[in-house]
Amino acid sequence: MHIVLYEDYYYNLFFPLIGFHPIFDLYAGFSRIYEKIFQLSKILKHIEGISFIARKNQLNYFLLKNKFENSVYDFSEDVLFINSRLVDIEKLLTLQKNEALVDASNEILAIRADKQIISKITPKALFDHMNDKLILSLCSNVNQADSIKYLFQIISKQDKFFDIDLFLFKNKLHSEFKKINHNLYIHPDAKINKYASIDPGNGIIVIDKDAQINPFTEIRGSSYIGKNSILDRAYVHDFTTIGSNCKISGEIENTIISDYTNKHHTGFFGHSYLGEWVNIGAMTTTSDLKNNYSTIRFNYRSSTVDSNEIKMGSLFGDHVKLAIGLMINCGTIIGECSVLFSNPKSKTIPPATWDETKQYDYHHLIDNIKKVMKRRNIEPDKSYLDLIDELYD
């Protein structure tokens, strides 16, 4: 069997993370979506290869960054197509040939196809769902599954993603990590100070390789601390994901912080999603609750979307920089590579914006990104710079 992991036309609703990432490159739970599919392939066994379908520049950088080859699938007798927005990944383990999973709108989330169905499937058909009705008519069985349609829904479903990861990564956790008490997994190379407090409670805590947990840090379940990340007097709790190479202080609740992001000072972030290479100034804080307890809304271009959640924070794209002492309203979206020196007036800030007043000068932006990445011994290549160019198109 061959696996094809793809993103569809809802990718725009995952702004502001889409500039640098395909949907399947986003954290959800304590792993990225594509990593879950890799683990799934180990459980399924007899997988011939995994292919990826996404927007050209984002896919190109994803493959180069991870040193993957995009294996070509042929019109064989057995191909498993997986939409990046599928949440119920464990349902793929029992999916038989010519069976499909769909969302509440009857759009395909996964299909295990034989040669006849494969002939009706093209990358464009996967992307725009135009052939879904025909494809599903050829299936022997169709079941509904849970999915995400907006970026903020990853935050809402963090509890479910943690459970899925615990199932998918069970063998890896037991073989590579020390299990301490109930659902506490610490990598042998992690450094835990004796004055740190770590309690998974009824959840799970995973502390990865070379993570450093310094004195008076408190971690509550469920939480994941990524490789090489440092926690200084931090309070991390309730379905929080800290990616690799981050520096974290202050309180973090039910939030995803992607790789190379620094929030190394006092301040609260709750129910939020931060991209890579974000820097948060001291005392800057997000709100995640309205005083009237009404649900939080996000503005996506010309439409307003109700999250149906009374607790929801902010969404920050890669390379966002925030000055000290800012107050960020709940439901705020800050586009990739934007810089803020004062409290935002708008709920949605476009990419590459300089303090909401003008566009960030392209050459200054490139220079600053190179400086920031050089501090971590990383040189952005052409495929990465192409993604920045897209922000100015």
Image: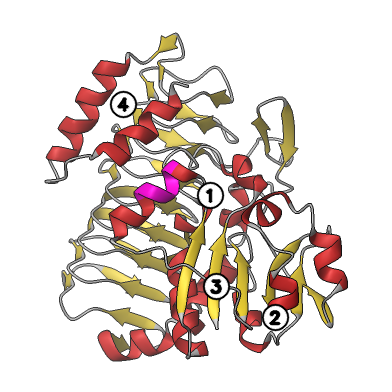
Name which of mark 2 and mark 1 comes first in the sequence: 2
Q: Amino acid at mark 4?
A: Ile
In front here: 8 or 349?
Answer: 8
Image side of residue 276 versus residue 148, left or right: left
| Residue located beneath label 2 in the image | 114
Report, in whole angstroms, how far the alpha carbon at label 2 lies from the one at label 3.
Answer: 11 Å
Name which of mark 3 and mark 1 comes first in the sequence: 3
**Res 14 quadrant in image:** top right
Residue 236 in the image: state x and y as whole percent.
38, 58
Q: Amino acid at mark 1?
A: His
Q: Nearer the viewer, mark 4 or mark 3?
A: 3
Residue 284 in the image: state x and y as whole percent.
37, 32
| Residue located beneath label 4 in the image | 324
- Numbered disc 4: secondary structure: loop
Q: Residues within 10 Å of mark 2 (few under 14, many from 20)?
A: some
Report, in whole angstroms, how far the alpha carbon at label 3 lies from the one at label 1.
Answer: 42 Å
